[in-house]
Amino acid sequence: MACLNNRLSYASWRLRVFRQLFRPNGSHPALYHSKSTSRNGTPLSDVLEFFEDEEEVKRRRRMYPSRRPSESLPQSPLITNPRPGYDKLHKKKRRPDPTESNIHLNPWAQALASPVRACKVTGVRMPRALLSEWGSIKRPDVPDKLWLLPVGLMKDKFPIETVLSKKSASKATNNNPNSVRHLTLRIVDRLPLLRTITDAYWGTKHARNRSPLAKLIPHRWKHPAGPMTPRDEGQLTWREDMPEFALRMMRQNVLKVLKKASDESSTQPEKRKVWTDIPMKQYGRSYLSRRTFSMEPFDRMECSAVLVLNRRKAKPGRITGLYPRMPNEVFVSWEKKTAPVFDLTVMLSDEELQELKAHHPRFENTALLFRPDNKATIDAMLALWKLRGFIRDDRVLEPPPLAYNLKSIWRSRYLL
């Protein structure tokens, strides 16, 4: 069998085609030794060499590299795109938006961006920055009893040790990682909730067979999955003054972070403008609202807060004996940027407020505008926010307004 138009055998023609199909990239096509001639009898190859010099041929080969005939065939997607989901999972990180460049200086965004966790008492899910960590601590007066305390607020008071039973202590010697970790649970920061737990715990102290605190212990802590045995559960106790104790710990924490923020913001005060005095001649809601609304606009107004430090010229109510309550938030400048109000005359005790005023003269003012710009000041703002939410709607620190039953002069004079 022979191939037509080429005086070649079929075997030679097939071998030549296979060599052309499977030759490596970059190789030049095979030159056929055909007897092609021009009209005047000159071989065609001589004619091409006459018109094309060697440099022109090299230039064309560089511009138009030869392709293998197999590359013109449809390619399998397994070869062209071996990892179809790789580009989607490994996208390049987008460039930061200029409007989002100061997000790390926004304390509210930092708190809301923390992981969401569940409160063990109420079951409500909130950001972790708004929850307190509670753990068990050995009582100094009674060796075989444990206190359930807010250990997250007492990190600088004493080293917290993990409370384990004898069985878990023996496991700890065997390098069991599950038995040496510190066990903590999270409870929402609300003073009325602590008062309710305290009343329920001590109100049924003598009429129960099991400690009510055992319900707060997660199942993963209990035996046999966890290190706590039934004996450890029975040792848990609740302080009788737990609401006052937690309030005192949180106030001390706020006082500490405010002092630290004041010290670290003392450099370049005119440029940074962390603390701005609000001129108020008298303590009151309307005075504060008018002063903040008349302020000039400035950068990052939405990250600021108002601190009320003095009850200047304020008088308690004639009937209730209570001072007027400050608003929860005010407008800053005519752009109406909302800023929360922290009334430190209510949030802190008189002794702590005097200690804060003695630390720096700026706290002698009636009100201050506080705008954080670093980690220390952001921590102070978050601590103030937690304390404000802790005492909100408390019947002792913030009693509800009384309903007055005053006699009407119209009824007494004209209707009766």
Image (tube, rainbow, N blue to C red):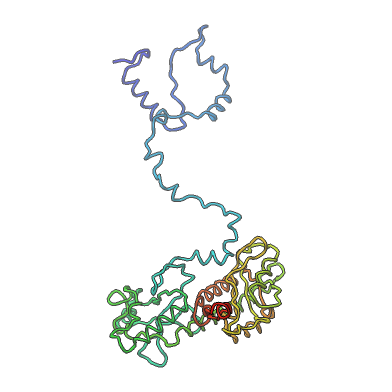
Residue closer to the observer: 7 or 328: 328
The residue sitting at 28% across, 85% down in the picture is: 209
Q: Quadrant of residue 296?
A: bottom right
Q: Is residue 317 left or right of residue 72?
A: right
**Measured along the vertical axis of the image, is residue 36 above or below residue 289?**
above
Residue 345: which quarter of the image?
A: bottom right
User: Residue 288 is drawn in which quadrant?
Assistant: bottom right
Q: In this orientation, does residue 263 appear?
A: no
Question: Would you say residue 30 is visible in this rendering?
Answer: yes
Image position of 184 (left or right of 400)? left
Q: How many marks?
A: 0
In the image, residue 94 lies at what x, y percent? 53, 51
Compare residues 224 and 109 and report the one nearer the observer.
109
Give the position of the N terminus as an image quadrant.
Answer: top left
Specify whether 217 is left or right of 348. Answer: left
Q: Looking at the picture, how far across and down is residue 84, in whole percent? A: 40, 44
Q: Position of residue 48 (x, y in %)?
A: 53, 17
Residue projecting furthest to the bottom = 141
Look at 68% across and 71% down and name the residue there: 276
Using the image as rendered, state which of residue 193 and residue 357 is in the foreground. Answer: 193
- Residue 247 image position (x, y, % from top left): 50, 82
Q: Which residue is found at the position 58% from the left and 54% from the top?
A: 97
- Rendered view: 250 above or below 49: below
The answer to whether residue 82 is above or below residue 55 is below
